[in-house]
Image (spheres, helix red, strand yellow):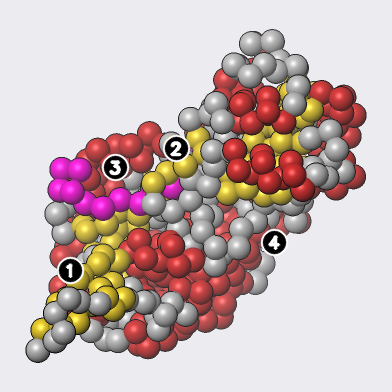
Amino acid sequence: MGNDSGSDSGVDDGIHDIASVIKEFADQPIWYGGQRHPGEAPAIAVRNPANEDVLSDLASASTEQVDAALAAARDAQYAWNRSGPSARSTLLHDMAKVLRDNAEVLAEVVMAESGKTWEMSHADVEVGAVMLDLNAEWALRIEGEILPSDTPTEEITIRREPLGVVVAICPWNWALTIACRKIGPALVTGNTVVVKPSEVPPLSTVLAMKLWHENLEIPPGVLNLVTGGGEVGKALVTNPISAMVSFTGHRDTGKRIMETASGTLTRVALELGSKAPAIVLKDADLDKAVPTLVQSRFWCAGEFCNATERILVERPIVDEFIKRYTAAVSELKVGDPRENPDFGPLANGAHYEKVDGAVQKARSEGATVATGGGRPEGADFEKGYWYAPTVITDVTEDMSIMRDETFGPVVPVLAVDSAEHAIEIANSSRYGLAAYLWTSSYASAMTVSRDLEVGEVFINRGSGEALHAHHGGHKESGYGGEDGKHGMVKYTQLKVVYHNW
């Protein structure tokens, strides 16, 4: 249950009494069949990462409730698919409007549960709305094909049809945005959806679900939500009703989902880990590269999937780069998310331990912590999951800090002998989501981007994708991809119809 006062939650009341807002939905967080339900499994404590106070003890769904949600989605799917593309488009636009109409309270919940700054919390809501709007526009643009036939009286058509029930298993970073990233293409293509938010920051997604159902006429069973941890996820994946599982999260969990889903041949889309390299060639403009690479690593505490995880700098400029970069990182402000610092705390305690463990292991392997390297000093940082922005130098390519995903405000810098050397190191990773390149040479930009084994390359710019393009990785960064036309069609299957008169 939610706390009784704003002070108990550790969050300033601001425009809304967030503790009271959370209490309104925390006792019945589960939605299926168009109705709210209390959780029947043990509750999971949701904490404010800025001070470790409990925001809510949110009940989890039982296995029986998971099965009921999937059954409700299955029973609703036929009628939803036949409601027509315009009706589906209208609903998604209306859902986006509900998010914007309630942006303040949603952003406050995002900030309280995730530690995002006020600006980033608003972005989590707005980008979620944009995801819904963009997918709504695909409703009347889903294309089929007409093929010639050797039979004069025959016509061959290829149609795109929905899969059925889509399971959307969402991560703890950018929780609301990524939920919308999965809900949008699933609904617009005629599927019904069961959403499982992360058990770490589930509150904003649960609140959004409540607002959608209370403000819109969503047909029962079309949009459902279950809360909980791994047992709930397993029940969703193993149920034969699930036609597709769209998962964003850790590589190891994604592999288990893929293995489990193979038992029923359930389709999967997996967005997994990353170790995105940034290559800085000797002809790079450091006046632009340095501040932009600070942004692409430390924006949102580095808790986003295509953040720069390692920087590879050509040897002639590496000393100058490290000097400038370390100085810029040292100026970053970590603090109370309500005061819009550069970033707030890490999202949860387990993640804090992972990030700090990576830094301490780098130290033990002989690396140098040039700045940061632990909890910031001061009384304001004694509680909570705070981590200072950290730059690590004197690394070698075989160190764990160069190979394992950190997903936090920590970045190693390594000298390389050439562009070819940088590409070799970049491609040595098991991951292949994104990469960054800084150069003044168009020829280098073309050859390096061609040879990098990744799904996204950012040249002379920071992070931030075009949402109408495509987001997906190579190698162990995932399977499937999301966004744009190529992401949307993955929620469909093909049917060939032979018309003979």
Image location (x, y in percent) of residue 460: 76, 49
Q: Quadrant of residue 370?
A: top right
Helix, strand or loop for disc 3: helix
Mark 1 or mark 4, which is nearer the start of the sequence? Answer: 1
Q: Secondary structure at mark 4?
A: helix
Q: Which mark is residue 475?
A: 2
Nearest to N terminus: mark 1 or mark 3: 1
Which residue, given by chain and number where applicable, does mark 1 sit on?
A: 74
Q: Around disc 1, counting alpha carbons within 10 Å, would you say few (fewer than 14), some (14 to 19), or many (20 or more)? A: many
Indicate which disc, 4 or 2, sits on the residue closer to the N terminus.
Answer: 4
Dot 3 surroundings within 10 Å: few (below 14), some, or many (20 or more)? Answer: many
Snapshot quadrant of residue 246: bottom left
Q: Earlier in the sequence, mark 1 or mark 2?
A: 1
Q: CA distance from mark 4 to mark 3?
A: 34 Å
Which label sits in the foreground, 2 or 3?
Answer: 2
Magenta run includes residue 379: no
Q: Which residue is mark 3?
A: 257
Q: Earlier in the sequence, mark 2 or mark 3?
A: 3
Front one among 106 and 272: 272
**Distance between the alpha carbons at the discs numbered 1 and 2:** 33 Å
The amino acid on which the numbered mark 3 sits, given as a three-letter code, is: Ile
Residue 119: assigned label? 4
Mark 2–mark 3 Cα distance, whole angstroms, equals 16 Å
- Is residue 179 rendered to the left or right of residue 383? left
